[in-house]
Image (tube, grey):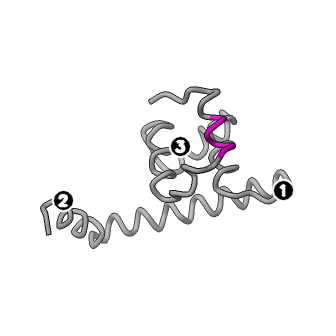
């Protein structure tokens, strides 16, 4: 075991990080449900992320609720939580087009 592995394991055992992970999951599920009901369409993680980036009012709302510093940190968190988003063609094209900045 190296130092980074031990630190990572300790962070995973930290109750406050587990609570914040659970809170983020709950927020994302609720925001996805809200978006699905409002648009009357099925929403997946890629569509939720695209909506967050494109829709400024939705973006502000989710940034306030999650208490994220900026859009970049929220996107980074979502990409870590849902690694399959890296392969999403829709997301890749949208980010390339908008050149999402830190």
Quarter of the image containing the C terminus?
A: top left
Q: Which residue is mark 3?
A: 63
**N-terminal-most mark, 2 or 3:** 2
Could you tell me how far apart the alpha carbons at marks 2 and 3 are, in whole angstroms?
29 Å
Q: Secondary structure at mark 3?
A: helix
| Residue 97 location (% of width, % of height) | 64, 27
Q: Quadrant of residue 26?
A: bottom right
Q: Main secondary structure of the magenta part?
A: helix
* Distance in Å between CA atoms under marks 1 and 2: 42 Å
User: In this rendering, would 45 be left or right of 64?
Assistant: right
The picture places residue 66, in percent across and down from the top left corner, at 50, 51
- Of badges 2 and 3, the one in the foreground is 2
Is disc 2 surrounded by few (<14), some (14 to 19) or many (20+) residues within 10 Å? few
CB within 8 Å, label 1 to label 3: no
Q: Are marks 1 and 2 in contact (CB under 8 Å)?
A: no
Q: In the rendered image, which residue does mark 1 sit on?
A: 41
Identify the magenta region: 89-94
Q: Which badge, 1 or 3, is on the more N-terminal residue?
A: 1
Q: Residue furthest right?
A: 40
Q: Relative to residue 44, is residue 69 depicted above or below?
A: above
Earlier sequence position, callout 1 versus callout 2: 2
Residue at the image point whose x is 60% and y is 30% from the top: 96
Say which residue appears at 74% left-offset and 53% top-offset. 35
Q: Residues within 10 Å of mark 3 (few under 14, many from 20)?
A: some
Q: Is residue 21 magenta?
A: no
The residue shown at (84%, 56%) is 41
- Quadrant of image for the N terminus: bottom left
Rendered image quadrant of residue 100: top right
- The image shows residue 24 at horizontal and vertical percentages of 50, 60
Q: Secondary structure at mark 2?
A: helix
Q: Which residue is mark 2?
A: 4
């Amino acid at each position: 075991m190296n130092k980074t592995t031990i630190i990572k394991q300790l962070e995973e055992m930290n109750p406050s990080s587990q609570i914040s992970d659970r809170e983020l999951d709950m927020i994302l599920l609720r925001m996805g449900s809200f978006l699905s009901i409002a648009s009357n369409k099925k929403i997946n993680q890629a569509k939720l992320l695209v909506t967050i980036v494109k829709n400024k009012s939705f973006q502000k709302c989710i940034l306030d609720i999650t208490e994220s510093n900026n859009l970049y940190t929220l996107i980074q968190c979502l990409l870590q939580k849902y690694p399959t988003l890296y392969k999403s063609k829709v997301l890749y094209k949208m980010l390339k087009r908008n050149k999402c900045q830190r």
